[in-house]
Structure formats: structure tokens, C-alpha cells
Image (cartoon, rainbow, N blue to C red):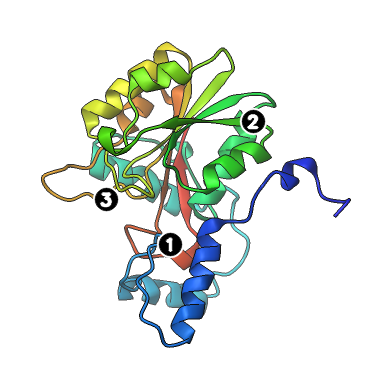
Amino acid sequence: SSLQSPALARVKPSATLALNAKTQEMRAQGRNVVSLAVGEPDFPTPEHICRAAKEAIDARFTRYTAVPGIPELRKAVAGYYATFYGVEAPMEAAMVSNGGKQVLYNLFMALLEPGDEVLVPAPYWVSYPAMVELADAKPVFVKAGAEACFKITPESLERARTPRTRMLILNTPSNPTGCHYNQAELDAIADWAVAHDVFIVSDEVYDRLVYAPARPSSLAGLWKRQPERVAIVGALSKTFAMTGWRLGFVLAH
């Protein structure tokens, strides 16, 4: 369409949703399909969560709320980091939005300027480059293959850095590879980013889906020390099996 903006013209349709539609079509034909397309738990939302939502509707709790979320929810988000990572945060540092993707989009629109470069470890979740491009910035892919356990390092990041590098998107555990950075690896990357004035968007929506002997890791500690250097993105989708509820959050400056 001639009415379409140049930014929108650069964005390709979601490969994930296209593959998921194909999966649903095959299932409708009676075929047995194991889908690895959509990051969705194979168990339902816990009953007590569903019950609380029904009670809220019955109590007519259905009107506008504050843009960053109601105080009780923002306190709960801050409390999440205190409970799991020992990082105390005030309610004002937490904000809630329509899913983790909306949080990421808002961050990119707020922080990026035309021409900024954003380091994106590859393989990557398909939506990162599209959202970066919508903000008129440029995704720069930092490849990490199977021989590196699909993990980037300060050295590989440094090779990709230019004077226009503004941001690093870090995703652990990773969608799609499942790779997980331990805390020492995260801290080393954080030290590199701080040294070179590169802002980190740490996408930690899978942070609780880590299994022994691995341990959960987070950049919440960096946020506590230098909150202007990092934004941590989380969501209720994976840990609490609430994908369709569209609830994401961010811990930020």
C-alpha cells in the first residue's frame, strides 16, 4: 500500500506464527504434529490464578488502571526480584505491559535513535530485528554456533562493536536454542557493556525454566548497582503458563 510507512515495509511477517498456523492446519487434518514453533508451556494456567481472575471480574474490577500497572502488581514484580535474586527494588522501578513483546517494543522506541546499532546474538527470537527496525535502528547479528554452545562472549561482541553501537539484546535462557548463560558469563558480558557504554536489554522471560545442575541467572544485580545501564524484561507467560493473558513487565531506571 502507498499508505504504508517505510519502517513497516521493512518488517517481514512472523515466521513463528506462519509455522504455528501450518501446525494447526495439519492437526485439523488429523495428523500427529509436535510443534516447536511457539514458546508455550504444555500445561494450563494454574487453577488458583484462573479463580482469582474470575473473582476480579465478578467484583467488577474491569475499569481503566494506571498505565504502569496497579500498585499491588508493580510491588509484586519488584518482589519477584527480591524473592528469586535477592535484589530489593522499589515499586517505581517496575512497569507492567501487554506481554513481554510490548515491553521490548516500548524500550526500543524509548531508547533508540535512527542509525543506532543493536547487537543481536544469533540464533535469535524472530521479533528482535523487526522491532529494532521499527525504531529506525539497525540490528547487527553476532553469530554463535553450536561449537560455542550458541553463546556470545565479550570477545565476539567486541568484534561486532562500532562507534554506533548503542544496545545489546541478551536472551537467557535463549529462544530458540535453549542455551543458558551462568552468572559468571552474564557478569563478564555486563562488564564489557558497561566499559563500552552499551545499554543491555536483558530478556529473561524464561528465567525460571532452568534445571539442575544449572542455576537461574539474572542481570538484576547489575540493575541494582547501575540501573541506568540495563532493563530487565520478564513475563508471566512461561513460568506461570499464562501466555494468552498478555502480561509482561520490566525492571528499569
Which marked residue is nearer to the observer: mark 1 or mark 2? Answer: 1
In the figure, 66 relative to 134: above or below?
A: below
Residue at image mark 2? 137
For the residues labelled 1 and 2, the Cα–Cα distance comes to 27 Å
- The residue type indicated by label 2 comes to Ala
Q: Which residue is mark 1?
A: 37
- Which SS class for mark 2? loop
Q: Secondary structure at mark 3?
A: loop
Percent x, y of residue 218 = 30, 36
Please name the amino acid that badge 3 sits on.
Arg
Q: Is residue 175 above or below residue 194?
A: below
Measured along the vertical axis of the image, is residue 102 above or below residue 184?
below
Q: Quadrant of the N terminus?
A: bottom right
Q: Earlier in the sequence, mark 2 or mark 3?
A: 2
Q: Residue furthest left?
A: 213
Q: Please name which of the two marks, 3 or 1, marks the residue nearer to the observer.
A: 1
